[in-house]
């Protein structure tokens, strides 16, 4: 089942259970998995892409082994909020995956994720040459960790009646804890 909003996704997942964050690239699929309380996410695996069927088998095997209860896909929107070819490919991947698993699937807006990764590398005092070489790897991890931590914060707040206005600061604190 594809859930278009975080609220509908939260309604579908159990209170406890790991979430998988996916970063779909043209060559790889980056995977991060949260703990069962949705408080910490860890980069887990990078799947080299082949055909959808082969990729799906690897991904679903991983979700089964890790007892994943929901999937969060990064949605690469354009800065104006529109969806280009990469976002359309991500949605197509989700539709195809939905046919193979009962797990709820949602999307998370990835705008400005490159800026976040670059900032994290600058704060770590990484040299320009090394930043250029590792931006994609760090970007994947940063995006997935923040996405899962933010969703975990939203999950907690929605279930316990808190307003969603504190999501960004809570997510940033969570991502900072995990990344360090």
Image: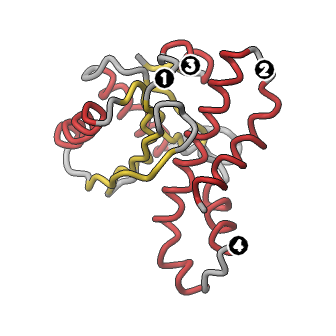
Give the mark nearer the N terminus: 3 vs 1: 3
Quadrant for the C terminus in the image: bottom right
Mark 2 in CB contact with mark 4 (< 8 angstroms): no
161 left or right, relative to 126:
right
Q: Give the residue at x 47% y 39%.
A: 34
35 w.r.t. 140: above or below: above
Q: Give the residue at x 21% y 42%.
A: 58
Q: CA distance from mark 3 to mark 2?
A: 14 Å
Camera-nearest label, 3 or 1: 1
Camera-nearest label, 1 or 4: 1
Mark 1 in CB contact with mark 4 (< 8 angstroms): no
- Residue annotated with mark 3: 10
**Residue count near mark 4 (Cα–Cα under 10 Å), binned few <14, some 14–19, many ≥20:** few
Give the mark nearer the N terminus: 2 vs 1: 1
- Residue annotated with mark 2: 162
x%, y% of residue 50? 20, 50
């Amino acid at each position: 089942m594809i859930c278009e909003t975080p609220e509908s996704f939260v309604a579908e997942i159990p209170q406890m259970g790991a979430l998988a964050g996916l970063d779909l690239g043209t060559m790889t699929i980056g995977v991060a998995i949260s703990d069962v309380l949705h408080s910490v996410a860890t980069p887990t695996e990078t799947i080299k892409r082949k055909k959808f069927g082969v990729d799906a088998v690897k991904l679903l095997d991983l979700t089964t082994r890790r007892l994943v209860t929901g999937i969060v896909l990064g949605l690469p929107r354009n800065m104006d909020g529109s969806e280009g070819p990469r976002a359309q490919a991500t949605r197509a991947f989700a539709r195809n995956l939905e046919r193979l698993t009962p797990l709820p699937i949602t999307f998370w807006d990835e705008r400005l994720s490159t800026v976040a990764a670059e900032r994290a590398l600058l704060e770590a005092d990484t040299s320009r040459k090394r930043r250029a070489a590792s931006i994609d790897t760090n970007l994947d991890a940063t995006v997935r960790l923040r996405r899962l931590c933010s969703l975990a914060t939203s999950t907690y707040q929605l279930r316990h009646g808190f307003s969603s206005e504190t999501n960004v600061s809570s997510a940033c604190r969570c991502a900072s804890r995990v990344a360090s």
